[in-house]
Image (cartoon, coloured by chain):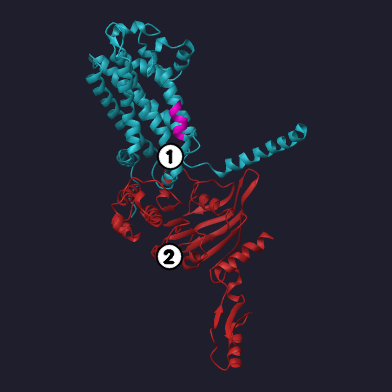
Amino acid sequence: MNKNLPGALEIGLKRGSLEIKQFFRQKESVVFTLLFPLILLAIFGSVFSTKIAPGVTFSQYFVAGMIASALVNTGFQQIAIFIPIERDLGALKRLRGTPMPAASYFIGKAIVVTVSMIIQVVLLLIAGVLFFGVNLPTGADKWFTFAALLFAGSLVSTILGVAFSSVPKNARGASAIVSPVVIILQFFSGVFFIFSDLPKWMQQFAALFPLKWLTQGMRSVFLPDSFATREIAGNWETGRTFAIIGIWLIVGTVLAVRTFKWNREEPSSRSLRLSFSFPLARVQRVKSPLRK
Amino acid sequence: MNAVIEVKNLRKNYGALSVVKGLSLTINKGEIFAILGPNGAGKTTTVEILEGFRSADSGEISVLGTDPSIKGGAGLEWRNRIGIVLQSTQDTAELTVREAIEHFASYYSNPREVDDVIELVGLVEKADDRARTLSGGQRRRLDVGLGIIGRPEVLFLDEPTTGFDPEARRAFWVLIKNLRDEGTTILLTTHYLDEAEALADRVAVMNAGEIIEISTPALLGGRANAEATISWSEAGMTKSEKSPVPTEFVKALSERLGGEIPELSVHRPSLEDIYLSMIGATHE
């Protein structure tokens, strides 16, 4: 007789190991997601080795920013690019046709994000400590902040990636839309440049999004406390950092749940677009006699 | 006969466009039912409503006694009893055939044996190859494998043999008939009329959102009573004539030619001939 259906968590764990397998078998994703940040680190860390404050080099500042970026690369960027690809390939629709609970799909994604995030953070830390004079956090409270930032940051980044995955219309558009968003946010959020040196409007714009706060949080972990006076607020703003991440977590979850699409564009929207094009065509026809 | 799929007066519009206009049909347990029709006839929309991928605007729809638009846990229970083979999917490219089938097996309460399914779809030699290295036909057979791994009571097949060579297609037909003989109900959409003829117990011809006729392939469109074409060779010429009573015609011909008729052939209209005339007729 029929046994009960397997649970969402059980299937989710299986999806996690499957996602990891697929991730490492795609050379592009390994290079793009895991190695690219290391290459950036090597370039920026070597070019700008000046001291920016007593006991703080730009390389150290940059490594803190790159670790914050790692959460965006492995969460937001990976998810917002790969979900549209899976949607285009029909993978999501196929899954939708099986008794796999929707939660299992997202558990699987969370697992692959966690694994690639930890690998990337460890690689950046090793490179930072070995080549760029980065000190590991000192004291339990700094390690705790670090762990909390990794957890909350990765979570918010992934959920925003799921929410953003409905924006690209197809797989080809995904990386063309997602990558610039990430790079611009990195420039604005004090990853490539020192945040307090940026124009005011850039700082204010960046302060709306989590990356700026994650970057600042990572500085609070990796830079000496004396550096806190160089931040805009004059301190690390740890409470505000987690509050803003919390707000984005709520906003992101609501958006993700409401906008997630398992299928490619339905013909309904295509025919809607058609009916929109009719009045446009009429306008052009009206205009043309005027041009004569 | 107990009905597995029942549709009454199904309607679906996309904006001002009416895609399905009051469609009704009943599919019984253990039959292979084919839906034929030109592109844009509303086949895909109808099937996707039955698969629960789209919602109907109105009508009564029951698949295994359940409305396919059902959500939540009951929806998963229902999906546990159906299998879907979609058109042209390219996912699972980096997984081997065995990995993909094994993984999908874990979604179901009572899956088939993974090795059995690999053998059923004829991929034993490819079991440990990545899906992206498979040919079009092998890829399609993997899709079918993923569709039947859960031991479905109803199997939806959308254009299943596109890209198959003739040999693979015949092997595939045997597989589908075996599934039917085990009691699986199969809803098939296809562009190949020979496939519908070889497989389907009944066919529905759809055009412009409506079903024109539901019948067995042999009786569709009055095929059984349609005029046959008799051709033969006489005095070095090939002759051909149509007759509603071919047996009478051949008998008379045989008497006139004194026994054996050279190069005799009696050709009944093929399903394709009938289908094309049905589709053409409604275009006018």
A62 w.r.t. B150: above or below: above
Residue drawn at x 48%, y 54% as measured from the top left:
B65
Residue drawn at x 57%, y 76% as measured from the top left:
B268
- Give the residues in magenta: A174-180
Secondary structure of the residue carrying numbered label 2: helix
A224 or A56, which is in the foreground? A56
B213 or A126, which is in the foreground? A126
Q: Chain of mark 2?
A: B
Residue drawn at x 46%, y 34% as measured from the top left:
A174
Q: Main secondary structure of the magenta part?
A: helix
The picture's colour for chain B is red
Q: Amino acid at mark 1?
A: Ile
Image coords of residue B16 (percent x, y): 66, 44
Q: Which residue is mark 1?
A: A85
From the viewer's perspective, is B98 left or right of B32? left
- Specify the chain shown as cyan: A
Check the picture and name the quadrant holding the C terminus of chain A: top right
